[in-house]
Amino acid sequence: MPEPTWQKSSYCAQGNSCVHIANTPSGAIHLTESSDPAHSTLGATPQAFAALIHVLKENPAHV
């Protein structure tokens, strides 16, 4: 299985404590918050990820 291509959040300031996302050939979305994405990751369906983004945009005080 090929390594995912991680993208850093555009809201990330300088430093390594940022959210990174990657998608897989199967369509799953992976999220991590470390500078080393190979450690702890969270998997989500595209629908669940879209719902998460929607909630975060609707409630920016919780971000």
Image (tube, rainbow, N blue to C red):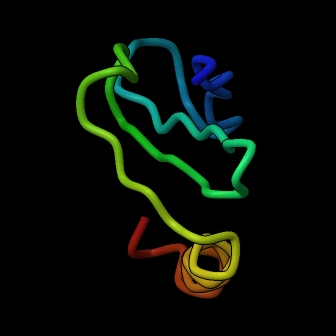
* Residue 23 sits above or below residue 61 on the image: above
Q: How many marks?
A: 0
Answer left or right for 37 relative to 22.
left
Could you tell me residue 47's position as x and y percent?
Answer: 68, 81
| Residue at 39% over, 74% down | 62
Could you tell me residue 11's position as x and y percent?
Answer: 63, 40
* Residue 9 sits above or below residue 7 on the image: below
Could you tell me residue 41's position as x and y percent?
Answer: 34, 42
* Residue 26 sits above or below residue 36 on the image: below
Residue 45, quarter of picture: bottom right
Answer left or right for 49 relative to 25.
left
**Relative depth, front residue between 15 and 38:** 38
Q: Residue furthest front?
A: 1
Residue 34, quarter of picture: top left
Answer left or right for 16 relative to 60.
left
* Residue 47 sits above or below residue 14 on the image: below
Q: Residue furthest left?
A: 40
Answer left or right for 8 relative to 17.
right
| Residue at 57% over, 80% down | 48
| Residue at 35% over, 20% down | 38
Quadrant where the C terminus lies?
bottom left
Residue 39, quarter of picture: top left
Quadrant where the N terminus lies?
top right
Could you tell me residue 20's position as x and y percent?
Answer: 53, 34
| Residue at 70% over, 53% down | 26
